[in-house]
């Protein structure tokens, strides 16, 4: 992709967050490098969100979609994406805030790593709870994760407002029709969807997003098991339906030699962690149908582990010597 023509879209999803919405929009507008377009999707709010949004629509880069029916977060992602024209899509919840240099850092990251399809970054919590949340203290190349997501349910990402994804990747799974299943926690669809369609994922260690903790956070403050005793069971089937839809949409068929494919996927992570090896060992042991390839795959996996250990590229050793992955 030509670096000078990389277009960016910011999708802000909102439902009854009028008190926070101006801060979110302003944080997107006041970036050191400007978004080409900011699309605000209001999910039929019953507060004065529409009035807040109308104040910003005079800005050329700001567009709005005011839905007539409340359908949940996934529906807002669907409609926002269909209206977006950017090469990279950024997602922002209406109660969160971007740091001013967030977009500049992300664009520089995409430009430096042309193979990057998906970035999530560290973030700071503010409001009722404060602190910094970092998966790691250095930037990471997390490789591909089709196999580990499909067979082990791996969730490689973070909260909505830390996510950005290349358009060609998002277009492989959005729009998703299961909107009632994902009225909340629709960032699961983005994280799992990107993995299943073959996104190469990266982690940016600098905390460039402010995640607001308040009494109306749909997920952070709610114990779903207390609300619905069958939550885990229902969620299993929602996830199963989501995976099936994305796989069918992309004509995915299971690899004939799962052990071979698993090891090749592991090798896309420049400095894997010990737990990465454990994950692929579990997948090969449980899901490889051929006994011959099951044994051969396990042998290959241990051989590769020893090689990584000897060369010092196992995650902890590599970071000490190099400062990044």
Image (spheres, helix red, strand yellow):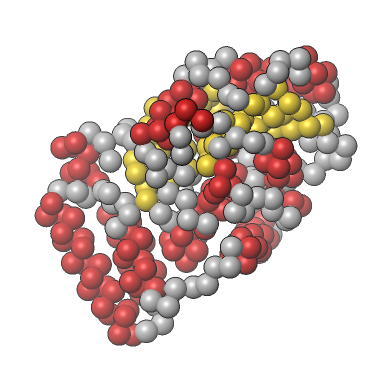
Q: Picture quarter containing residue 96?
A: top right
**Which corner quadrant holds the C terminus?**
top left
Q: Nearer the viewer, residue 244 or 153?
A: 244
Res. 274 in view? yes
| Residue shown at the point (40%, 33%) measured from the top left | 111
Residue at the extreme bottom = 291
Q: Percent from the top left, x then y, of residue 75?
A: 74, 44
| Residue shown at the point (83%, 40%) measured from the top left | 70
Q: Percent from the top left, x then y, of residue 140?
A: 34, 40
Q: Indicate whether 140 appears above or below 147.
A: above
Q: Indicate whether 282 appears above or below 169.
A: below
Q: Picture quarter containing residue 159?
A: top right
Q: Nearer the viewer, residue 73 or 274?
A: 73
- Please give left or right for residue 213 compared with residue 176 in the image: left
Residue at the extreme right = 68
Q: Percent from the top left, x then y, of residue 120?
A: 47, 38
Res. 213 in view? no
Q: Picture quarter containing residue 72?
A: top right
| Residue shown at the point (25%, 67%) measured from the top left | 301
Q: How many marks?
A: 0
| Residue shown at the point (70%, 22%) measured from the top left | 62
Q: Percent from the top left, x then y, of residue 236?
A: 62, 62
- Please give left or right for residue 113 compared with residue 87 in the image: left
- Please give left or right for residue 155 compared with residue 206 in the image: right
Q: Nearer the viewer, residue 203 or 2?
A: 2
């Amino acid at each position: 992709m030509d670096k000078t023509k990389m277009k960016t879209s910011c999708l802000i999803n909102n439902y009854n967050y009028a008190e926070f919405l101006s801060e979110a929009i302003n944080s997107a507008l006041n970036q050191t490098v400007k978004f080409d377009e900011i699309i605000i999707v209001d999910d039929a709010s019953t507060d004065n969100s529409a009035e807040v949004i109308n104040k910003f629509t005079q800005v050329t880069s700001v567009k709005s979609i005011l839905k007539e029916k409340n359908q949940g977060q996934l529906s807002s992602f669907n409609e926002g994406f269909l209206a977006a024209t950017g090469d990279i899509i950024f997602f922002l919840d209406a109660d969160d805030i971007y740091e001013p240099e967030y977009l500049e850092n992300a664009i520089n990251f995409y430009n430096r790593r042309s193979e990057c399809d998906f970035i999530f970054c560290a973030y700071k919590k503010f409001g009722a709870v404060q602190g910094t949340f970092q998966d790691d203290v250095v930037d990471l190349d997390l490789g591909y994760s089709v196999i580990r997501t499909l067979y082990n349910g791996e969730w490689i990402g973070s909260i909505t407002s830390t996510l950005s994804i290349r358009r060609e990747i998002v277009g492989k799974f959005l729009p998703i029709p299961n909107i009632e299943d994902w009225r909340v926690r629709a960032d699961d669809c983005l994280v799992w969807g990107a993995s299943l369609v073959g996104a190469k994922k990266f982690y940016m260690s600098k905390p460039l997003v402010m995640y607001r903790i308040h009494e109306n956070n749909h997920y952070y403050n709610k114990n779903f098991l207390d609300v619905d005793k069958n939550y885990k069971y229902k969620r299993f089937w929602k996830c199963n339906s989501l995976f099936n839809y994305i796989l069918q949409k992309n004509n995915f068929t299971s690899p004939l030699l799962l052990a071979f494919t698993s090891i090749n996927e592991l090798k896309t992570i420049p400095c894997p962690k010990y737990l990465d090896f454990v994950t692929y060992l579990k997948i090969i042991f449980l899901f490889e149908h051929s006994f011959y390839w099951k044994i051969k795959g396990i042998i290959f996996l241990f051989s590769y582990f020893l090689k990584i250990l000897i060369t010092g590229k196992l995650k902890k050793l590599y970071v000490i010597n190099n400062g990044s992955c």
